[in-house]
Amino acid sequence: MKFLKSLFFIVILGAIGAAAYFYLPILRQDSSNSNTNINMPIGANLAYVEGIAEYRDPAGSWKEAKADLNLLQGSSLKITGPGRAIINLDDGSALRIGADSSMTLEKLDPNNIIVVNNRGELYLRIAKSSRIFEVKSDGITYESMGTAYKTINKDKTQGVEVYESKVKIIGAEDAEVIVDQGKKYYLANETDQSSVKVIKELKLEEIKKDEFVMWNKTQDESQTEFKDEMGILSDLTPPELSITSPENGAKTKESSILIEGKTDAEAKILINNAEVKNESGVFSYKANLNAGENKIKISVVDTAGNKTEKELTITKVVMEPAVTNNTSIKLSAVVTTGGIKFSWTVGGINVDQGFKLIKSLEINPVYPGNDYQYLTESGTRSYTWKISDGKTYYFRVCQYLGGKCGVYSNNVKIKAPLAETNNTSGVVKSINLSAISGATVSWTLNGYSSQGFKVVWSETSGPTYPTRSADQYNYYSDPGQRTSTLQAFNGSGLYYVRVCEYLGGSCGVYSNQIQINL
């Protein structure tokens, strides 16, 4: 009996082994095939951060977000206050988040990417592909049919602006809405109720004033895959306008003068409101002159509506007084290290009250009226003016008579040297900040800041740029800016103020810190 039981178990085990031999390879093959059908999420990398940024993984809490952070499917990112960020996806697309904005990477399936605009502004630069790319915002879905658009989700404003190709809107109406390149569509608009649920043209002037869009335009132009697909953003450049003759400030005894110049081949040309024929980008126009100063306005408008304007001042001289060698000042100048050195001679003139050395961007600088240096010594015959901005100026020196000039010298036209950049921090050695009056501050600097300045202020000591949560800033792109007017942003009281050399995204040299009451 025991022998029969043992034989039975041996037969059963043999059958199981045979089945495993034949069916396990099939099971492995099925399992392998099943794995290849699973779409793994594509990668997302936080490539750039400016300002205060935080991120949250699907099951985590908010943490500080820094550049080169890899984000997971389901992660969220937010910018608090001024700032912006760039997320690059592995499919070549870029998501750019504006100030006071928040978004979520809901789905990173290679065949269907879904991003949620939780709040604020989100600019999408989409790499063209057969996959579906969607942005969701308060029950509305924006489906990409091209490469460049911005979605807006603010308290009382919601919609889309399309800069290249098309965007399909799902959920806004019973039927789908298609918004073409150069158009906008709002579901709510606090400032323009007439534009709600109406497809309208995007005005180029509005785009130029949108700092976030213009920043995105610069980003797109720097990338090979996007720079040739700029859509309407490629039409923001104003037309060229070059006046080849005459020189601004010219004088003539003639009753008319020939205006000659160059512009874009398709541009419309207006001179003193009279349309002038465009000969493949070259134009000429005879302008009649009255005695004295004549203002001649030249305007060119390209096919996209961008305009460039210039104005000439031409003087018709009725009779110029003769200048004798016995009563004259003759001026000459040469460029030297860090400025321009002037020398002059004087003949037959009482110069007991000294001289005024005057400069202007226009011919015939005068005192009072233009920038000047007062040289009190009557025996002075040379002076070095420290100018290093690379601009071309006109200079004259005059006999000072107390409150006004007497005899003027000849004009000297010369280009100032440009301060050399020795390192990535520019050439600013120091900045000195002081309070003028009320809410206005002023600064001087040793050096030159080519990208301008950031003025930062806060109720907390040590304001910086990029700003902390309690800081505010004013940006001035003009290297010649020297004053700023501030406002209390958290009630009246004592505020800390600094100004810094702006380096594009960050600051270099900071000034001293002062305190003012706002």
Image: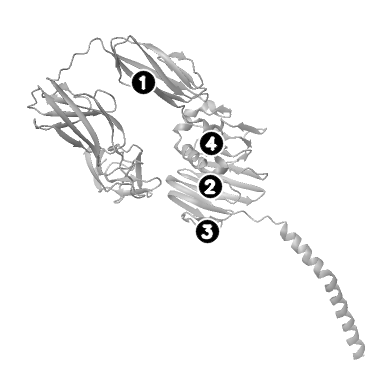
Residue 351: quarter of image: top left
Q: Earlier in the sequence, mark 4 or mark 2?
A: 2
Element class at badge 3: loop
Which residue is identified by label 2?
103
Element class at badge 1: strand
Q: Position of residue 83 (x, y in %)?
A: 43, 45
Amino acid bearing label 2: Met
Are there few (<14), some (14-19), or many (20+) residues within 10 Å of tag 1?
A: some
Amino acid bearing label 4: Gln
Above or below: residue 192 compared with residue 26: above
Q: Is residue 269 left or right of residue 411?
A: right
* Mark identifier at residue 158: 4
Which residue is identified by label 1?
311
The reply to whether residue 171 is visible in this rendering is: no
**CA–CA distance in space, label 2 to label 3:** 16 Å
Amino acid bearing label 1: Glu
**CA–CA distance in space, label 3 to label 4:** 29 Å
Quarter of the image with the N terminus in it: bottom right
Between disc 2 and disc 3, the foreground one is 2
Amino acid bearing label 3: Gly
Which residue is identified by label 3?
60
Element class at badge 4: strand
Q: Earlier in the sequence, mark 2 or mark 3?
A: 3
Question: Looking at the image, which residue is at 47% across and 20% down?
Answer: 282
Residue at the far bottom in the pictured view: 2
